[in-house]
Image (spheres, grey):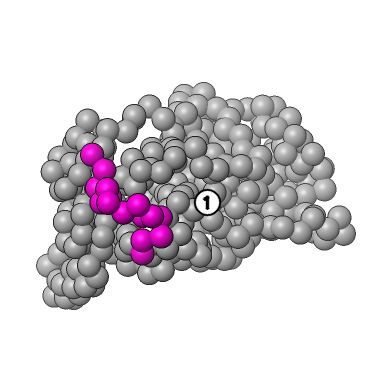
Amino acid sequence: MLPIPADLIDFQYFQMRILLIKTTSLGDVIHNLPVVSDLRASLPASRIDWCVEETFAEIPRLHPAVEQVIPVAVRRWRKNLAARTTWREIIAFRRRISAVAYDYVLDTQGLLKSGAIARLARGTRCGYAAEAAREPWAARCYDATFVIPRNVHAVLRNRWLAAAVFDYPVDLPLDYGLPTRTSSINPCAEQVAVLLTATSREDKLWDESHWCALAAALVERGLKPILPAGTDPERRRAERIASTVQTSRVAPPLSLSALATLLADARVVIGVDTGLVHLAAALRVPVIALYTATDPGLTGVLGTGFCRNLGGKGQPPAVADVLPVVDQALR
């Protein structure tokens, strides 16, 4: 079933209003950026808005084809449901998301919470069929559903769903739509390696001794390791690692936009299973992702630049596994 009106012969020039819903998490939001690029390439006259968790709102704003970003705060609201300010914010959000009459509302997340948000918006609501959604009950929130294979990378699932809804080819070039470094590397400038040592789960961490050895090896290759960190435990861990190598330093607290700038200027980015490695891939920076507790097959780094996934569930890579790949990236 194709929700687009069949009588629109030149539908690519029809100025549709489209609302994308992909709220969390950071990696998932980044994985949805190519959908915007595909829509802009296939439906150049369309106007695209995006509903996303407030914490990650800076990411859709980086894409020039996103017109409006509508922040939602489900995570924060859940913690303060008894507060009057929470309900005032919820009411204001409902008014804002229903203020525009969209032609199509596309939920590429497939969760009950994202489906519920889709129900608040006005327009033909589209999403995964029950057998394809991460939470099958979410399919009840949509007017049109589509069966998309679950055994393909998350980026492809998002793109294939949008292609099914809007009836355009699935083989468009992969484009995250983010500005990338276009100038050649200045050999006289300081060469930075960004090490992303923090992640949301303890079992996804890479051993600190491995990071120390890797940082020392990077310095031997003429690179200066920079370690971003957010929370206090992450910062203490980064400081312990940086203290073992004289030229390493811990970056100050940075916004997502500032982190994107730091990553874009890096010679190489090496990180554990965290959303920022996907941001590096989207920016076409050479990136090496280290997996210790998850399988990178469906959610590993994917991009048009140098991207490598090392390790897997219960199989953390050794430093000796990483260094040859670093040398490939630097070449």
Residue, x 73% and y 30% (percent of image)? Answer: 324
Disc 1: which residue: 176
Query: Toward which corner of the image does residue 56 lie, by quadrant?
Result: bottom left
Residue, x 82% and y 43% (percent of image)? Answer: 220
At which x and y percent is residue 58? 45, 65
At which x and y percent is residue 162? 36, 45
Residue 256 drawn above or below residue 224: below
Residue, x 22% and y 30% (percent of image)? Answer: 131
Residue 167 drawn above or below residue 60: above
Question: Considering depth in this image, is 148 or 183 the residue closer to the camera?
Answer: 148
Please identify the residue farthest to the top as the structure is shown. 315
Q: Residues within 10 Å of mark 1 (few under 14, many from 20)?
A: many
Q: Is residue 174 visible?
A: yes
Left or right of 253 on screen, residue 39: left
- Magenta-span inclusion, residue 12: yes
- Magenta-span inclusion, residue 37: no
Range shown magenta:
1-15
Question: Considering depth in this image, is 162 or 254 the residue closer to the camera?
Answer: 162
